[in-house]
Image: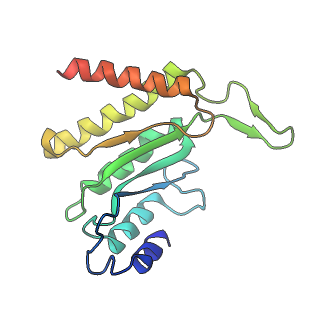
Amino acid sequence: AILNVLRNEIPGGFRTGCFGDMPSTWLTFSCSDKEHLNDGSLLTDALTKVDELDPEAKLLRAIGVNCCNLKNVKALTEVIVEHILEPGVPTRDIVLYPNSGEEWDAHNETWLEGTGTTAPDDFAQGVMATVRNIQKRIQQQRGSAKVPSIIIGGCCRTTPETTAAIRRCIDTMQGQTE
């Protein structure tokens, strides 16, 4: 639905490829498990639909997952990477914005302690393990020159300390590759 709205609402827009100064756009999916969106549909079906509506990646420069449990992110990004590696599928950057994975107790209106990855360093390590997995998988198939950018962050129940821990991991990783 989002792509259809953007295609039809951009003046002179999507059909002619005339975006002017329109910034790059991301589309992320909230997922309930390792393969389904929150509405129950398959992530693979959503990715296929994105490519049908934007086959040259002119509108959507990045796709990914957000507000989903960190423990599911590795499997979800494997679905995205496998899709990107299919012949004829455009390479888009990848977005990862998982939540802490804590469970919400609606009856008591509180988060259940111990149900997620709340320690900032543990969260950052989990995200970075996924980043390394993405890079390794794409490099195996296409070589290092073809690895898309990976945009990372945190969603619900992450904190500025979490973001700082991710930054430290990135700095460490970059120091190891230089």
Query: Is the residue 57 above or below the residue 166 in the image?
Result: below
- How many discs appear? 0
76 over 108 or under it: above or below: below
Is 164 on the left or on the right of 176, as rendered? right
Q: Position of residue 29 (x, y in %)?
A: 49, 55
Question: Residue at horizontal 43%, vertical 26%?
Answer: 166
Q: What colour scheme was applied to this rendering of the protein?
A: rainbow
Report whether residue 143 is seen: no
Q: Is residue 145 above or below residue 15?
A: above
Q: Is residue 76 above or below residue 164?
A: below
Residue 128, position as x, y percentages in the image? 38, 29
**The image quarter in which residue 51 lies:** bottom left
Write the residue at 30% across / 70% down.
19
Q: Where residue 89 sits in the image (x, y, percent)?
A: 25, 63
Q: Residue furthest front?
A: 21
Q: Quadrant of residue 139?
A: top left
Q: Position of residue 45 (x, y in %)?
A: 43, 65
Is 62 on the left-hand or right-hand side of 117?
A: left
**What is the quadrant of residue 140 in the picture?**
top left
Q: Quadrant of the C terminus?
A: top left
Residue 130 visible in the displayed image: yes
Seen from the viewer's position, the closer of residues 136 and 53 is 53
Tell me the residue at 44%/64% (across/down): 46
Residue at x-position 41% and y-position 60%? 44
Q: Is residue 157 left or right of residue 178?
A: right
